[in-house]
Image (spheres, helix red, strand yellow):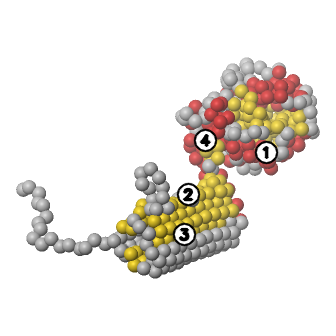
Amino acid sequence: MKLAVTILAAGQGSRMRSRLPKVLHPLGGRPLLGHVLHTARALNPDGVYVVYGHGGDTVRAQIDQTDIVWVEQDKQLGTGDAVARVLPQIDDDTALLVLYGDVPLVRAETLRPLVEAAVCGRVGLLTATPADPKGYGRIVRNHAGEVQAIVEEKDASEAQKTIGEVNTGLLAAPAKLLRRWLGALSNDNAQGEYYLTDIVAAAVEDGVEVAAYAAEDFNEVLGVNDRAQLAHLERVFQLHQAHALMREGMTLADPCRFDLRGTLRIGQDCAVDINVVFEGEVSLGDEVIIGPNCYLKNVSVADGVTIEANSVLENAIIGPRATIGPFARIRPGTELKAGAKVGNFVEIKQALLEEGAKVNHLSYIGDAEIGPGTNVGAGTITCNYDGARKHRTTVGANAFIGSGTQLVAPVTVGDGATIGAGSTITKNAPAEQLTITRVKQLTVRGWSRPQKDK
């Protein structure tokens, strides 16, 4: 039997109080719907169907996946109606798994028993037992413990409301049977909607077994209805990632103060302090040390690198044993070779620092190449922009750039050259020579500072 997965993502999400469709709100740097799609694909389905409605154009634009079949639900008539809109595109010899675009943390391992039940001609149902079942549909069983029905709380009796086992909404069933059951649904209920959960009673009436499986972790089946619930699941998700990385050997000063919004590959003996955020594709070599409050996005970091506190790195390549920070900003297009050093309050952009090059303090190096062993003094600026175009600065090997220097690009400083502090260099500086543009110091005797009127 084939497997199809349908993801219900048509709800407006009014409690989010947002112009952004609910399923596009990010969790761990990925839209909620993106998490569900990732889980669905882990099951290797023959088809993935997403039922969309509110903000559908936005949803389809942001979730650009060629393997998705999009199905519109123009009127919100309930989950039963949503699944019924998918069925015309699915063959009878198919097991259909129903997921929700706002339930992002469910795992493929949790869903496989449901799929296996549906493949065997049964209904696979995922249940849970939360500390407080209020708001959830209750699982009604007979004296033999067999599932008989699901009753939504608004339709439940007082006795049924005392039931602790609840419906998660996640189920799987043979498409051929679903087609019959959904066609017979009624919207005669408190919501005036067609409930997908009513197929459970229909299955029991037809003598089809309903196999219920309990979720081990209730957080796994929690949906997102407002921003508080989104924040809760964000911390759950991040803690899961932190524990996984620690099992791989990473040291985290506090796993509760860690954020990964993408993928992170690590070597051995990496140590990460509090409030560090990783985004996009990040790789760390062996023995990388990252101080507190750092941000790394799309960065490759080699062995033995130290990144001090409050540093920001984006779209950069960091070579072995380089040192960065504190309070450094490494902007896109930067590459630091082995042993390079970028110190406090230094900004580097579209620049190459060769092996052993140092920019220690309060400098801006943009659109530049700094040769091996060169030392750039405090307050040095590469003046790379003329108001219309960017220009490059090239500094050779083992040069010394004095503090407070402005290198007005395009300009080249030769190997072993020395630039005197406070210079403005507008012409190429020859190798192994001292170049200085300092004006003559003048003292004006008898000069008085202006005074405020009394």
**Which one is closest to the eye, mark 2 or mark 3?**
3
Q: Are marks 2 and 3 in contact (CB under 8 Å)?
A: no
Q: CA distance from mark 1 to mark 3?
A: 42 Å
Q: In the image, residue 444 lies at what x, y percent?
A: 15, 71
**Which one is closest to the eye, mark 1 or mark 3?**
3
Q: Residues within 10 Å of mark 1 (few under 14, many from 20)?
A: some
**Which one is closest to the eye, mark 4 or mark 3?**
3
Q: Amino acid at mark 3?
A: Leu
Q: CA distance from mark 4 to mark 3?
A: 39 Å
The answer to whether 112 appears left or right of 52 in the picture is right
The residue labelled by disc 3 is 353
Q: Are marks 4 and 2 in contact (CB under 8 Å)?
A: no
Which tag, 1 or 3, sits closer to the chain's start?
1
Label 1: state its secondary structure: helix
Q: Amino acid at mark 2?
A: Pro
- Judge whether residue 170 can be spotted in this image: no
The residue labelled by disc 4 is 25
Q: CA distance from mark 4 to mark 2?
A: 26 Å
Q: Residue, x 82% and y 31% (percent of image)?
A: 200
